Image (cartoon, helix red, strand yellow):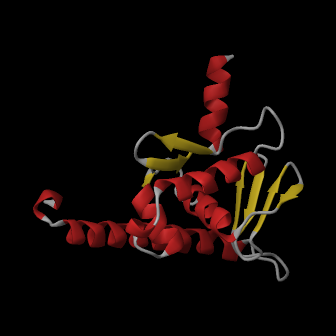
Amino acid sequence: MILLLDERQQDEFAQYLLERTMKTRTETMCFHLKHNWKQDSPLTEFQEGDLYICLEYRRVIVHEQEIALTVKEFDILLLLIMNPERVFTYELIMDLVWNEDYTYYSRKAINNHVCNLRKKLKTEPGDPDYIKSVTGIGYKSVSYTHLRAHETAAN
């Protein structure tokens, strides 16, 4: 069915699916967080191993050390972490993070932000790579539990 759509319609359909997925995931997270909510606690937090992210405070902590990220670095990280294993194309990242048409930027802009983000998140030599490249397509995040299982199998 998607092959019958023109490029604009395919983009709109992909955007619809992404918004629906993110809305459902956010609603589920909010439901779980409301039951554990304390008055002075942030509402949306993610924990992947030694990586901690707080959406409301835009805070990233690795090994109990706060990491300073740019606005775009934080937004890219949040997009990927909220959707583990999902591959995001360069075009989709540009659309969702920059809210601008991909034709005005190059892949190099996204690559530079992701490269800087990776350097900042790898505070110790043994730290996992939270962001994986998908050659020629874009990026995805790998869940920490998947990384741990892979490391155990390799040993």
The answer to which image quadrant residue 33 occupies is: bottom right
Q: Is residue 142 visible?
A: no
Nearest the camera: 33 or 13? 13
Residue 52 position in % (x across, y down): 76, 57
Q: Quadrant of the N terminus?
A: bottom left
Q: Name the quadrant containing residue 71.
A: bottom right
Could you tell whether 6 is left or right of 122 in the image?
left
Drawn side of residue 59 relative to residue 46, left or right: right
Q: Is residue 19 above or below residue 132?
A: below
Q: Is residue 111 left or right of residue 49?
A: left
Which one is in front, 97 or 107?
A: 107
Relative to 5, is 64 above or below?
above
Q: Residue furthest right?
A: 64
- Rendered view: 125 above or below 143: above
Outermost residue on the bottom side: it is: 39
Q: For the point 67% across and 33% down, which residue is it?
A: 148
Quarter of the image that includes the C terminus: top right
Q: Which residue is rendered at x = 83% and y = 44% of the image?
A: 123
Residue located 23% across and 71% down the image: 8
Q: Position of residue 34 (x, y in %)?
A: 68, 77
